[in-house]
Amino acid sequence: LLGTSVWYSGVAFFLAYVAGGTPATISALKNVRLAKLDINLLMIIAALAAASVGAVRDGAILLFLFSLAGTLEKYAMGSTKRAVVALMKMRPDEANLLHPNQTTTRVAVENLMIGQLVLVRPGEKIPIDGVIKSGEGAIDQSSVTGESVPADKGPTDLVFAGTINQEAILTIKVTKLANQSTLAKMIRLVTEAQEQRSPSERFSNWFGQRYTILVLVGSVLGLIVFILLGLPLETAFYKAATLLVVASPCAVVISVPAAVLSALAAAARNGVLFKGGAALEDFGNIKIIAF
């Protein structure tokens, strides 16, 4: 039983090293080619150092936690992407183009030009930003403005793509192209939010790169000092490896982007859009909101 247990443990640790170490190794090698040292390289070296001194379990746990944090970060990014897909589904692909002879033709929303008229029947989604030329009725704007109650709209009132015409036949004059509509801007904001790093994220990346160099250099110097102090090579290497593992700042470096992306994704699911992590952090300093 003991031999079987050891065999199972060995396989589990090996799988943990492969599953947790492969993505980090690929990322680390890419950065090394660009003459950059990042937290991925530090974690791989720390895990290998732990294995070399017999602490295979510690290295496996280290890689597992590191890969788990990366997985959570990717899940948060996936939530943001799903929010983008949900926003894209809000806008119809086609619109009823109204001709001067009062006939209509189904055309792609992207082909609508400013000044053209579109006809929107009750229950249909408004395909484009515009101004009402004729017709009066309630418009469900909750998907764009967050209003819980439909807004009454009439001639000269603005309407937005993705909102729902509830009860009237409306003739709408196009005022913005499809790629310039309010909904299109919302989609771009959510997409770009992942690329706009907050001050904390920028500091985290800056800190991670420099701290990686510091820890690697410190571990090598520690190994040299331990050898000069007369410690056996195996003991000196064990102490240097311990320093390398303990000093790895993966939790600090990964926690910031994971937290920011999770917050952006959660906000997007609830209809709140932040223009990147910087805006999210600034929001925490707001004391008064005026409506």
Image (cartoon, helix red, strand yellow):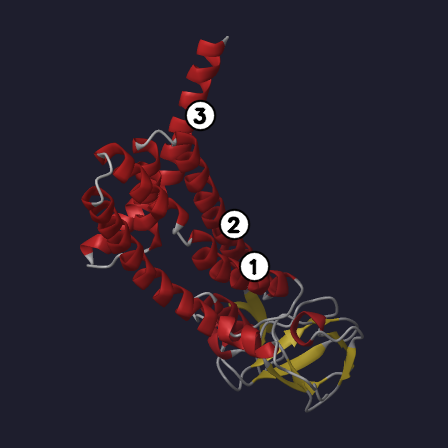
Would residue 38 appear left or right of 103 to someone viewing this image? left
Label 1 CA crowd tier, 10 Å (few <14, some 14–19, many 20+): many
Q: Which amino acid does label 1 sit on?
A: Ser
In the depicted structure, whether residue 97 falls above or below residue 213: below
Question: To which residue does mark 3 refer?
Answer: 12
Q: Can residue 52 be seen in this view?
A: yes
Would residue 219 appear left or right of 157 to someone viewing this image? left
Question: Tag 1 or tag 3, which sits nearer the N-term?
Answer: 3
Q: Position of residue 95 (x, y in %)?
A: 58, 69
Q: Which residue lies furthest to the front in this view?
A: 230
**Disc marking residue 254:** none
Tell me if label 3 and label 1 are in contact, CB under 8 Å: no
Label 3 CA crowd tier, 10 Å (few <14, some 14–19, many 20+): some
Under circle 2, the secondary element is helix
**Which of label 3 and label 2 is nearer to you?**
3
Question: To which residue does mark 1 refer?
Answer: 262
For the point 78% across and 73% down, the residue is 148
Question: Of 87 and 270, which appears nearest the observer?
Answer: 270
Under circle 3, the secondary element is helix
Tell me if label 2 and label 1 are in contact, CB under 8 Å: yes
Mark 3 and mark 2: span between their CA atoms?
A: 22 Å
Under circle 1, the secondary element is helix
Mark 2 and mark 1: span between their CA atoms?
A: 8 Å
Q: Which amino acid does label 2 sit on?
A: Leu
**Which of label 3 and label 1 is nearer to you?**
3
Q: What residue type is labelled 3?
A: Ala
Tell me if label 3 and label 2 are in contact, CB under 8 Å: no
Q: Position of residue 88 (x, y in %)?
A: 55, 63
